């Protein structure tokens, strides 16, 4: 079992395609690992291994449509962040008591793509309520602990996905990112997370389809696996007006056959943030590596001095539009604070 969980997603999919391992074996390994580590880290509070087992019967039909697709996963178990829907599986919107009994009948658009391309969803990963916090904690499921040191935070809001990957419960997991909610947990848990360009991965069903701040993206243990997951997440959907077709070529091929860029833009802090000395050292070392490869690196960025204020205003306004009906009845300090930021911004703009 441990040997299977130590495989990369790319390695596991290659073995699945060759028939050298079976989806049932990977499900059993994932389930066993979850039973072992969940009491310590609490990353996968909603599990659906029985549903995943039933989905195996649909793989032959899906293979006929997708087995030549570069993102075909051939029965690889994955986890989905609990802000997205999986049909027939509870979505609590990040452990919100308001949604504790909600079971969607339709999967989110990108989940539909992933399942059609051979993913087996084994559970929902923990998130702060509505993804409104930078620490993964909620009143329904509690806190997710960092697998490397359970006394430490995973950050948020995709902390459950990052922890599940780091602990070896799954090979791939989805995250969502508005203000570093994929990137921060990935960094805290020593895995990899990518915030895609808005429109790359279709979102929905949703109330605010023209909101470009939040995106859904892949999380994995290495860059090649990120490319593999993005390959089967990406693409347009008629229900998402901002989603676009996948670009020509392949994300997987781009990682296997990289093309060296001629020029890169770089900023250590974007002019607005503090950076820990250890982080700064690693980033500067990476920049020097690029320069040693003959790549021109320009240390500059636009003026982001007002970016944080603007960000909170737009974010708060979107929260008002999407959540006000719930917050008025179930107001708490966390969600109330985000709404008040939006309310203040609206008042200033009148």
Image (cartoon, grey):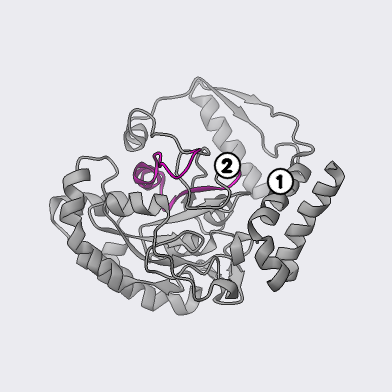
Residue 274 visible somewhere in the drawing: no
Identify the mark at residue 314; answer none if there is no mark: 1
Quarter of the image for residue 164 reads bottom left
Image position of 30 (left or right of 286): left
Magenta segment includes 180: no
Q: Residues within 10 Å of mark 2 (few under 14, many from 20)?
A: few
User: Which mark lies nearer to you, 1 or 2?
Assistant: 2
Where is residue 221 drawn, in percent x and y? 41, 53
In reply to whether residue 219 is colored magenta, the answer given is: yes
Q: Name which residue lies at 58% across and 53% down.
A: 181
Q: Residue at x 60, y 72 (%)?
A: 138
Residue extent of the magenta highlight:
213-242
Image quadrant for the C terminus?
A: top right
Q: Position of residue 290 (x, y in %)?
A: 52, 29
Against 28, is 196 above or below? Answer: above
Q: Indicate left or right for 15 with 261 as reference.
A: left
Q: Could you give the CA–CA distance between mark 1 and mark 2, rounded to whole angstroms?
A: 13 Å
Identify the residue at the far left of this view. Answer: 19
Q: How many marks?
A: 2
Instruction: Please report whichever mark, 1 or 2, sits nearer to the chain's N-terminal start.
Output: 2
The quadrant of the image that shows the N terminus is: bottom left
* Residue occupying the point 55% across, 45% down: 209
Residue 144 image point, x, y percent: 54, 70
Where 282 sits versus 147, above or below? above
**Local secondary structure at mark 2:** loop
- The image shows residue 68 at horizontal and vertical percentages of 20, 40
| Proximity of marks 1 and 2: CB atoms separated by less than 8 Å | no
Q: Which residue is mark 2?
A: 210
For residue 329, which quarter of the picture? bottom right
């Amino acid at each position: 079992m441990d040997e299977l969980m130590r495989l990369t997603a790319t390695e596991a999919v290659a073995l699945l395609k060759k028939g050298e391992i079976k989806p049932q074996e990977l499900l059993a390994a994932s389930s066993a690992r979850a039973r072992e580590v969940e009491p310590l880290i609490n990353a996968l509070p909603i599990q659906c291994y029985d549903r995943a087992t039933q989905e195996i019967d649909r793989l032959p039909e899906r293979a006929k449509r997708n087995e030549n697709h570069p993102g075909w996963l051939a029965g690889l178990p994955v986890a989905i962040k609990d802000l997205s829907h999986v049909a027939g599986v509870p979505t609590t919107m990040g452990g919100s008591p308001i949604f504790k009994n909600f079971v969607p009948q339709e999967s989110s658009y990108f989940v539909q793509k992933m399942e059609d391309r051979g993913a087996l969803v084994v559970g929902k990963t923990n998130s702060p309520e509505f993804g409104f916090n930078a620490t993964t904690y909620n009143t329904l499921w509690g806190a997710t602990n960092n697998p490397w040191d359970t006394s430490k935070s995973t950050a948020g809001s995709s902390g459950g996905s990052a922890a599940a990957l780091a602990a070896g419960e799954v090979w791939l997991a989805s995250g969502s990112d508005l203000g570093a909610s994929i990137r921060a947990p990935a960094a805290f848990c020593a895995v990899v997370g990518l915030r895609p360009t808005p429109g790359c991965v279709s979102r929905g069903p949703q109330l605010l389809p023209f909101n470009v701040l939040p995106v859904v993206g892949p999380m994995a243990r290495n860059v090649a696996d990120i490319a593999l997951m993005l390959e089967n997440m990406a693409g347009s959907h008629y229900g998402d007006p901002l989603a676009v077709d996948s670009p020509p070529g392949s994300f997987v091929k781009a990682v296997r056959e990289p093309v060296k860029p001629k020029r890169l833009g770089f900023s250590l802090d974007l002019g607005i943030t503090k950076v820990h000395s250890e982080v700064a050292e690693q980033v500067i070392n990476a920049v020097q590596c690029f320069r040693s490869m003959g790549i021109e690196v320009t240390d500059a960025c636009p003026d982001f001095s007002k970016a944080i204020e603007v960000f909170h205003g737009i974010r708060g306004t979107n929260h008002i539009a999407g959540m006000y009906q719930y917050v008025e009845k179930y107001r708490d300090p966390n969600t109330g604070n985000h709404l008040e930021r939006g309310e203040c911004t609206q008042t200033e703009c009148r």
